Amino acid sequence: MRPHGFAVITLFVGSLVAGLGFCALLPPFEGFDETAHYSYVQQIAQTGTWPRLNEPVSADVDDYLKVAPGPAALPPRWTYRAFFKASADTVHGGAAAIHTKSDPARAWHAGTTNNWERQQPPFYYTLLAPGWVLSRDWSIYSQLFLLRSISYLFAWSGLVIATFTFARGWGVSSIAPVQAVGPALWPALFPMWFPEMARLGNDSLVLLILALALVVIRKAILQRGKTFHFALLGAVCGLGLLTKATMLPFVAALGVFLTWRVWRGRNDISAFRTSVSQLLVFCLVTTAVAGWWYTKNLIDYGDFIGTNQGVALAEQGGLLKGLSEKFSLLMFIRGGIVGNFLSFVWSGTWSFIQPRLLAYIPLIILYVVVATGWIWHSAKTKVIPSIEVIAALTLIFFIVAMLHLTLAFIALFEGYSRPGAWHLHAFAPLLAILVARGLVEATAWPHAGQLLGALVLYPLLFLLFATVLALFYFAGCFDSRLDISHFSHSDLAALATCAASPREVFTHLTTLGNPALALPMFSAGWLTMLAGVVIVIFRGLFTLTHATSAPQRTCD
C-alpha cells in the first residue's frame, strides 16, 4: 500500500469530513426513511421493545411534522417552499421544533403514522439507542446530527478496514495495491454514497459488518483457515442478518461458494471432509445467531423477512395472482431495470432532488466502462480469484432480489415499481474489488487514459452540483422535484432568483440546521477528495498492473 498510501489517506480524510458535513447539511428527517428509523431507535431506547406490524412511529415524529417541513416522499404538511412562504409565526414555530432542546423526562408516546421499518432486525437500533439516550435533551437537529454521524462512522470505518484487509491480505496478487485504493475511492466515484450513508439507517452497519467478514474470509478461505475461522465467519454473518435482510445476498454467495468448494474436493476424502465440516459450521453458527429472528417473522407474519409487502401479498393471494392482474412489462423495465440502476447512480435525499438525466450520462458511462473492464479481464484470463467470485455472486443475488422486490410492488400497486438500489452501496467493501479490477483493465485500452481520467473526476463535480440543487430546494427555492419530467421553467426562474439572494438562502438553511458548520465541512472534505482523485490520476495508480493480463493464481 506504500506507493498508494498518500492517495488513500487523502481520499479517506476527504470522505470523512465531507460525510460528516453532509450529515449536518440535511434538514431533520430528510434522509431516507429517517422518521421510521429514528422512531425505532427511540422506542428501543425508552421502552426496550421494537415495533411490530401496524404499530405507529413516535408521537414526537408526528408532532414535529405538524409544525416543520419534511421530505417530499412522506408527503409532509409543510413543503420547504410552503413553509418559508408562510407567516413569520409558522417559521418561528418550525425553527423552535428544530432547535429547541427536548424535555429529557418525556416518556414514549405512540403517534398515528405506521412505522413501515418495523420489519428491520433490532441490532443496529440497539447500538444507536445509547446515542439517543445521551442526546435525549438535545434539539432534534443536534440529536439527528449525532446519530447520523455515528451511523456514518460505521460505514466509513468499514471502508478503512477493507483497505487494510486488501493491502495486507492480498499481497500475493500484483493488483493488490490497486485493490487497496478501491474502497477509499468509492465515495468519490459513487456520489450516491453520501445521501445513503450520511443518514440514520442500518445500511451503514451492514457495510461495517461486511468489511469485518472480509477480514475473516482472508483467514478462513484465502489462507485455508481452521474450523474456528468458519465459525467466526458465521457469527459475523449472523450479526449482519440481525442488522438487515440485505445481508442475505452476501450470505447466499458465501454459501454457494463454500458448497462449490465441497464439490471441487469430492475426489480427495480429506479435503472433502474438511470442506463439508467448514460449510456445516458456517451454516449452523449463522443460523444460531440470526435464525430466531427470521423464524419469528415466518411464524408471526407468514414471511420469513417480515416485510410489509410480503405480508400484504400473502393477504392478497400471493405474488403470481397480483402480477396476473397488474403486471406491465414497460413498468418492469422502467422501474426494475432502468429505475433501479439510476437509483443506484443518484436518487438524492428523501425528497429525491434529481438533476436532468443528461447529467447522469458521464456517470453511467464510467460505471459501464468499469463493469466492461472487469468482464473483459475475466474473459481474457479465464481466471477469477475466489474473492471476486464471491463479490460477483453477491451482486447477482442482490440484482435478483431487487427485481423480485420490483415485481412485488407492481403486484401490490399498479403503476408503481419503487426502485431503490441505493442499498447496493452497503456492499462497497466487496464490490470495490471489482471496481479496481475494472479500472485497471480499462486503463490498458488504447487511447482510454485521458477519457478515463475525465470520467473519474466527473462524479465529484456531479456530487457538488446535485448537493447545491438540494440546498436550494431545502431553502424553499422551488417545490417540484428536479427530475427529467417535472423540472419546469418556473423552477428555473425561482432557482435563479434564489441564487441572486445568497443571504436569504443561508438564513433559511440556518432555520433548518447549522450551515455555518456544515458548509465548511462539506466543502473542505469535497476539496480533499478532489485532491485525492487527482493524485490517483496523475500518479497513474491504475496503470501499474497492465502486466496482469496474464492469468494469476486464484486466491483460495
Image (cartoon, grey):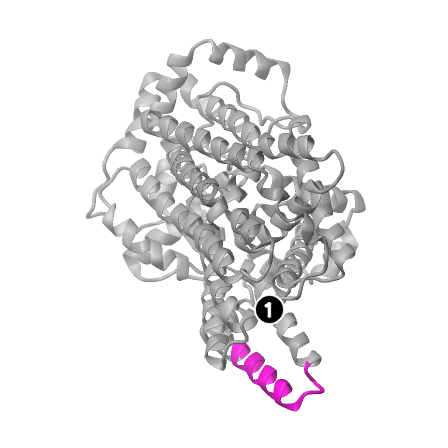
Q: Secondary structure at mark 1?
A: helix
Left/right of residue 94 with respect to residue 314 in the rendered view: left
Please name whichever residue, 519 or 536, is drawn nearer the observer in this view of the structure.
Answer: 536
Residue reaching furthest left? 105
**Residue 472: % across, % down:** 48, 21
Residue 276 among those drawn in magenta: yes
| As drawn, 253 above or below 37 | below
> Which class describes the residues within 10 Å of circle 1: few (<14), some (14-19), or many (20+)?
many
Dominant secondary structure, magenta: helix
**Looking at the image, which residue is at 68% across and 82% down?**
265
**Looking at the image, which residue is at 52% across and 81% down?**
281
Left/right of residue 244 with respect to residue 95 in the rendered view: right
Based on the displayed image, in which of its 4 quarters is residue 13 positioned? top left
Q: Which amino acid is tagged 1? A: Leu
Left/right of residue 556 with respect to residue 292 in the rendered view: right
Left/right of residue 521 with respect to residue 219 in the rendered view: left
- The residue that label 1 is drawn on is 254
Q: Is residue 394 visible?
A: yes
Quadrant containing the C terminus is bottom right
Residue reaching furthest bottom? 269
Please name whichever residue, 330 or 365, is drawn nearer the observer in this view of the structure.
Answer: 365
Q: Is residue 38 visible?
A: no
Magenta residue span: 265-283
**Looking at the image, which residue is at 71% across and 47% down?**
373
**Residue 198: % across, % down:** 44, 41
| As drawn, 346 above or below 105 | above
Please name whichever residue, 109 or 417, is drawn nearer the observer in this view of the structure.
Answer: 417
**Residue 168: % across, % down:** 48, 59
Based on the displayed image, in which of its 4 quarters is residue 87 positioned? top left
Residue 303 among those drawn in magenta: no
**Residue 207: % across, % down:** 48, 54
